[in-house]
């Protein structure tokens, strides 16, 4: 989307330290999500009247919610759910988007125009709306999120891949490879993939951030995951009425969401275009 | 073909495909509803007590509900193309009337948020871009990175807790008076401004580093004259092109923010329609939002061409 021809670096924020900090944050979040059940074993659904909004103790260092459930276990489960859906959606969106992008740029002509038009039609529908409609079609909520988010996220992969590949296809190296009789698979692995891979990582981090935001936002307005499933947005809306009694309990999912998204945004570096 | 004509034709094809996509998705939604459709429609007509298998069968024959799926979809799509959305399953009012009513409230909120974000974002971005690498530039980078990591619903939650509950300055929810605008509009505007400030900053830094800008300074223009004559128009294209993306962000924000602040707009209605499986309402709303996006982008194409008539095909997006 470079509008003005320029020779100064536009991605001034892609500094290595910020990427490192983002990776460290993500490792922290992921480590907590995976290790918490081992260190503090507790059922995230188990209620206990004696622990209603109780302060942190040795069994649950993050305290307890309004039904006496362990916030440590619930937060870890919520993070695992969000991260798993986000990872699955990003992976399938990348596969679909890159395949469609290579196809469109390689074949050109009417194939290119048709696929581009389909992508533009998907682009016109707000992502949240697409996820909402799919969630009304597919009965299993995590699966609905996965399909809906894939339909939202593939467009960016497609646009980027198409732009990159159509630029590269004109390069002499690829022409030489094809004249030498190498197949499409070889050309993709040898010439296209090395150019695509670093940008795909950035897109993946942004895509995961989008996915986690949408899951939490829909949970927050009660059209996402259903209670009693531990989910970041749901946890916030459940704990909001008890804000005066237990502000720290509300802060738990809020901070976890912020740190996860901050980590992803820092890893992505650069700016979103 | 004339490039402007080609751009318009492309947008028309895009609009048609958006309608088809919405048609397919809402048709699938209709098909996946549990229960017998004929029975439900009959219950809607005659009341739940008066309906029996015979009445349901009559409805099935009359409306052709036993047709194969492809034929049913053809009829469904034809209705959609005639903009005949039918009536809301929940309220019983025609979908068009409901949407017209809600759209006004949503547009008010969206325009207030957009205006607020334009007051905050681009001026800060331009100041930062004029001194790329300066303290304002670095501070703005940190703030906008942090803001982008706060989802809009979370920003709404934070503002409600801080401003309404703790300080008691503004109502947490409601509609009708001026003070009801402030919190939801500010929530949306902060998210938009975080990004538009970055766009303005990058565009401004690029222009400020360009030779023609240096030449303008060299021939004795003041900084203000320089910005007005050589800066703003060049940033304008980037900002206007970006408005399309802002619209998409705004629509997504509106869906969630309206539900949180109890704003009687299209997003609030959409969440309710999904919750109640009100297919006609979902269809009307989705089509309106999709076609609105296409129309807006068509306008942006033309506006960008008008601001900067050089190579018109280099910046088509969306």
Image: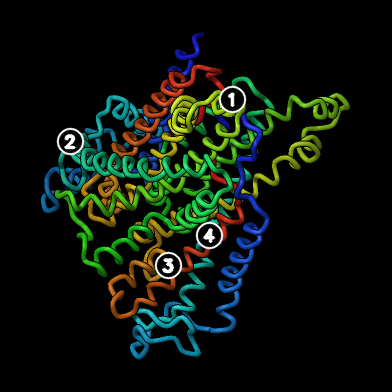
Judging from the image, what secondary structure is the residue with disc 2 in?
helix
Query: In the figure, residue A208 lies in which quadrant?
Result: bottom right
B251 in relation to A28, above or below: above
Q: Mark 4 lies on which chain?
A: A
* Foreground disc of the pair 2, 3: 3
Q: Pointer 4: what residue?
A: A262
The percent position of residue A224, horizontal first and vertical second, equals 39, 58
Q: Pointer 1: what residue?
A: B215
- For the residue carrying disc 1, how many other residues have a C-alpha within 10 Å: few (<14), some (14-19), or many (20+)? few
Sooner in the amino-acid sequence: mark 4 or mark 3: 3
Dot 2 and dot 3 within a common chain = no
Q: Residue at x 66, y 28 (%)?
A: A105
* Foreground disc of the pair 4, 1: 1
Q: Mark 3 lies on which chain?
A: A
- For the residue carrying disc 2, how many other residues have a C-alpha within 10 Å: few (<14), some (14-19), or many (20+)? few
Q: Pointer 2: what residue?
A: B97
Q: Which residue is drawn at 23% across and 60% down?
A: B172
């Amino acid at each position: 989307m470079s509008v003005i021809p320029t020779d100064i670096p536009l991605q001034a924020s892609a500094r290595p330290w910020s990427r490192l900090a983002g990776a460290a944050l993500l490792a922290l979040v992921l480590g907590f999500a995976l290790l918490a059940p081992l260190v503090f074993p507790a059922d995230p659904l188990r209620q206990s009247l004696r622990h209603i909004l109780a302060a942190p103790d040795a069994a649950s260092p993050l305290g307890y919610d309004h039904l006496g459930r362990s916030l440590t276990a619930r937060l870890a489960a919520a993070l695992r759910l969000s991260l798993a859906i986000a990872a699955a959606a990003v992976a399938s969106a990348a596969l679909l988007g890159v395949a469609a992008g290579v196809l469109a740029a390689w074949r050109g002509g009417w194939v290119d125009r048709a696929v581009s038009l389909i992508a533009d039609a998907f682009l016109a529908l707000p992502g949240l709306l697409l996820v909402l409609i799919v969630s009304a079609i597919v009965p299993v909520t995590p699966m609905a999120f996965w399909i809906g988010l894939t339909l939202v996220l593939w467009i960016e992969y497609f646009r980027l891949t198409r732009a990159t590949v159509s630029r590269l296809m004109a390069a002499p190296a690829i022409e030489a490879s094809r004249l030498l009789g190498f197949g499409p698979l070889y050309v993709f692995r040898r010439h296209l993939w090395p150019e695509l891979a670093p940008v795909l990582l950035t897109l993946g981090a942004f895509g995961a951030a989008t996915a986690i935001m949408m899951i939490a936002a829909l949970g927050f307005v009660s059209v996402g995951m259903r209670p009693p499933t531990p989910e970041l947005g749901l946890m916030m809306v459940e704990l909001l009425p008890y804000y005066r009694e237990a502000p720290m309990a509300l802060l738990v999912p809020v901070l976890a969401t912020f740190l996860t998204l901050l980590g992803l945004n820092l890893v992505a570096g650069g700016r979103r275009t | 073909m004339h490039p402007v004509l080609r751009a318009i034709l492309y947008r028309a094809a895009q609009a048609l495909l958006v309608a088809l996509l919405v048609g397919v998705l809402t048709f699938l939604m209709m098909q996946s509803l549990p229960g017998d459709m004929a029975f439900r429609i009959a219950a809607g007509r005659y009341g739940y007590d008066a309906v029996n298998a015979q009445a349901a069968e009559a409805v099935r024959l009359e409306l052709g509900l036993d047709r194969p799926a492809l034929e049913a979809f053809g009829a469904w799509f034809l209705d959609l193309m005639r903009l005949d959305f039918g009536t809301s399953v929940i309220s019983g009012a025609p979908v068009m009337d409901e949407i017209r009513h809600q759209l006004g409230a949503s547009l008010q909120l969206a325009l207030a948020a957009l205006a607020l974000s334009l007051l905050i974002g681009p001026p800060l971005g331009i100041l930062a871009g004029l001194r790329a690498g300066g303290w304002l530039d670095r501070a703005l980078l940190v703030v906008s990175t942090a803001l982008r990591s706060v989802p809009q619903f979370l920003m709404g939650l934070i503002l409600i807790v801080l401003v309404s509950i703790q300080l008691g300055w503004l109502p947490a929810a409601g509609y009708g008076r001026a003070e009801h605008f402030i919190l939801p509009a500010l929530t949306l505007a902060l998210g938009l401004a975080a990004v538009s400030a970055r766009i303005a900053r990058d565009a401004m830094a690029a222009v400020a580093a360009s030779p023609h800008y240096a030449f303008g300074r060299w021939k004795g223009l003041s900084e203000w004259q320089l910005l007005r004559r050589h800066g703003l128009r060049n940033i304008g294209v980037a900002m206007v092109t970006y408005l399309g993306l802002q619209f998409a962000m705004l629509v997504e924000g509106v869906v969630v923010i309206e539900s949180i602040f109890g704003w009687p707009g299209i997003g609030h209605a959409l969440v309710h329609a999904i919750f109640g499986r009100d297919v006609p309402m979902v269809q009307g709303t989705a089509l309106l939002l999709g076609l609105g996006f296409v129309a807006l982008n068509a306008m942006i194409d033309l506006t960008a061409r008008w601001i900067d008539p050089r190579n018109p095909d280099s910046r088509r997006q969306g």
